[in-house]
Image: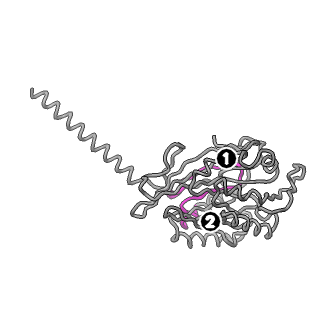
Amino acid sequence: MNGEKNRGNVLSSILIILAITIAGTALWYGSHLSSSFTFNSPNFPLSLKKSNPHVSILVVGDIMLDRNVRNKINILGFETFFAGVKDLITDADIAVGNLEGPFTPHESVIANLKNKALQFTFDPALVPEMSALGFDILGLANNHTLNFGIKGLNMTREYLTNAGILYYGDPDNRDEISVVMEKNGIKIGFIGFHEFSYINFAKVMAEIERLRPEVDVLVVTPHWGPEYQSEPSDNMKKWAHEFIDRGADAVIGTHPHVVGSIEDYNDKKIFYSLGNFAFDQYFSEETMRGIAVEIGVDKTKAGRINMLYNIRNIRVDRDGTSVY
């Protein structure tokens, strides 16, 4: 009888210790969730606690609507071309992309596929379509925004504004390089950076420091680096680290046309390149694959910000863009 009692006491003690261990582990993980926490399941909820203010952000790569993309949209229709990513974009509270060229009424000089000039112009009739698809903000800090000069840039800004799409970033890192959007009581700031103008880098750094105290989350989206290279250059690493040191919560890059590496730096995320989102570079698997970054942002009652990340794989093909 005493032996059975002792065994029962031992079993009870083991269960109590096990319960304490499990509770302690759960408490430790709960207290250590931060922007460095990353997951890759598209079915995992982008929210830590439903009662908290929450915003879902989607950032996609290079969007080019001229040349063969223009031709395919004219044949298939805009909705069909982007049908494979429509839900991805519309489901996000804030959808952001890099607009790799201007919207102007000029006739395309490369849609015939014979002219090799890299001078893009996008049909202004597609601006309301982009808005209806779900894009809220488009970045203009890249090497094709000035393909039709300052006049083309100003046209683009006007077309986007009239369609209710915000924009940010400047090809010369000069004006309107940031934008702030507030959703569900959370302020999200975006800052553009264009490497290949080689000017006004200090303005971008100063804008990060200026905007930091005004927003809950700050994302820098640089257009940078060697084309078709997945690993970052030394300059890219240096700038990415400086962006974060000055106050950025995440760095999400474009331009190389292939997916780049991902780095954790000071508990912040650096996506060196998202690759293509809508482009006609069908000559390799690398240029036909991209990623989209989903960011779930929660704001606790104490004002703490938690960021969760999810990566979605994008397929860029002749018949449109899709998630896979």
Horizontally, residue 322 falls left or right of residue 149, namely: left
Which numbered disc, 2 or 1, marks the residue that appears first in the sequence?
A: 2
Q: Position of residue 252 (x, y in %)?
A: 61, 56
Q: Quadrant of the N terminus?
A: top left
Residue at 52 percent across and 71 percent down: it is 214
Callout 2 crowding tier (Cα within 10 Å): few <14, some 14–19, many ≥20: many
What number is the disc on residue 290? Answer: 1
Q: Quadrant of the C terminus?
A: top right
Q: Position of residue 234 (x, y in %)?
A: 65, 57
What number is the disc on residue 191? Answer: 2
Q: Position of residue 86 (x, y in %)?
A: 64, 48
Residue 168 vs residue 134, the one in the foreground: 134
- Residue 254: within the magenta? yes
**What span is colored magenta in the figure?**
241-269
Horizontally, residue 130 falls left or right of residue 152, namely: left
Residue 287 visible from this viewpoint: no
